[in-house]
Amino acid sequence: MPAEDVQSEASLGSLTLSSPLTTTSTTPLSTPSPYATWELPFGKAWVHLNADQQFTRPVLIADGFELGASDHATLYNGLNDNLPDEQNPNRPRYHFLDKLKDRGRAVVLIGFNERSASLLDNAKAIREAVIKANAENVGGTKLMVGGFSMGGILARYALAKMETDGETHGTEVYFSYDSPHRGAVIPIGLQAFAAFIPNLAGQAPDPNNDFYQYVNSPAAQQMLAYYYDHEKDEVGLHPLRQAFLDALQEVDFWPRQTRRIGVANGTGNGVSGSAPAGQIAVQSTGQRPFPGTTFYLQSQGETVQVALLRRYKWTGGVLEKTVTTSGLPELDGAPGGTLASYGLVAKKIVEAGGEVELHYPAVCFVPSVSAVDVREVTNQEDLYTPADSLAGESQLHEFRCASTNTLHTSIVPELCEWLLERLPE
């Protein structure tokens, strides 16, 4: 195989499935300087005073999942809906952080040295931030603590562990924003593709490949409802996820001394999204770098094909692998917060010199039933159950689903307004 073709394949290594909050902008961002920066175990926090320049009635918000360290500018502008939107540049913006500060709330943004590290480690950063916030809180009011996506899971565990350990967290309201309480989903075909991308020597998997590191990071393995083991060619629950679920059980699953609320970027009506099972999501139509590679939307059934992976071998010829699943529900089309998972793969193949046909760029990432903790995502009936009708089954005291399926962690005015109405006094 020509060296330039291996190089083009290796360029796919920068692919990660970023949410709006974690996508680094190529445009310089104007970001208010924090009043203080707290150094924390496994991370740091950026403190922003309220509109009256006081540290009162704090709201602590934890960052979500990605590779690498949290970036203050990206996190602040993501939460404040200031990031560039190439798809809809003229849409109205909803400045969530500004509205918090205008309501007299100080804002503490909690970031991590490595966002893909173990949840059990990064939760320690939240614990320390909670302790510091209580120590510096003017007036001694109760905190609101939570996070977007993974951040909501970390805050849930951190507060629950503080209670189990007999520590005072001073938190009145816990919140989560499209957090995968019962697991997130990355299409199995894409997980398999992460281990199919070669390094410059033509060997796969490439341990330095960003996409491979993304899927196989401790945090991903702890949050994914389904994990593809490329060595065994099997789909199942990763041992790290089971260990994290055991750790949650040890702290009684949830913080019990708080009011617990949450929102979902997906709908609560149980209606399928626009990703019909079995259809081709994206297909590489060019000769390079992955000729004929095809990804299919997840279907039910036994030995269902979800991907045909093809690439040239260094020694000549084409290496081909068929990826199948058995017993999985129709995950891609489920109601939930979406990611442009297939769209990102298509874009990267084109950037590497290939050609593609893209039919379904965005699919479900965090099912609504997971984000509001009402059902498991492991069977069809539960996955498509109308979450809005199951408030009594959730460990959240209240939740709100979006009116339409929206991008995972995107700032949705109706969801943010609902959260603002439930700020602690």
Image: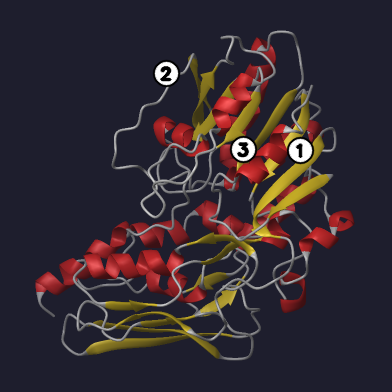
| Res. 177 visible in picture | yes
Q: CA distance from mark 1 to mark 3?
A: 11 Å
For disc 2, the marked residue is 33
For disc 1, the marked residue is 160
User: Badge 2, how many Cα within 10 Å: few under 14, some, many 20+?
Assistant: few
Check disc 2 and give the amino acid type.
Ser
User: Badge 1, how many Cα within 10 Å: few under 14, some, many 20+?
Assistant: many
Q: CA distance from mark 2 to mark 3?
A: 25 Å
> Relative to 279, does residue 217 appear above or below in the rendering?
above
> Relative to 401, does residue 46 appear above or below in the rendering?
above
Q: Nearer the viewer, residue 229 or 75?
A: 75
The N terminus lies in quadrant:
bottom left
| Res. 157 visible in picture | no
Label located before the other in sequence (1 or 3): 3
In the image, which is nearer the foreground, mark 2 or mark 1? 2
Mark 3 lies on a secondary structure that is helix
Mark 2 and 1 residues: CB-CB less than 8 Å, in contact? Answer: no
Instruction: Tell me which residue sits at (84%, 44%) in the image.
Output: 397
Instruction: Tell me which residue sits at (53%, 86%) in the image.
Output: 278
In the image, which is nearer the foreground, mark 2 or mark 3? 2
Q: Going by the image, does 318 lie left or right of 108?
A: left
User: Badge 3, how many Cα within 10 Å: few under 14, some, many 20+?
Assistant: many
Mark 1 and 3 residues: CB-CB less than 8 Å, in contact? Answer: no
Mark 2 lies on a secondary structure that is loop
Check disc 3 and give the amino acid type.
Ala
Instruction: Tell me which residue sits at (71%, 55%) in the image.
Output: 245
Check disc 1 and give the amino acid type.
Ala
For disc 3, the marked residue is 123
- Which percent across, then down, holds residue 307? 44, 83
Label located before the other in sequence (2 or 1): 2
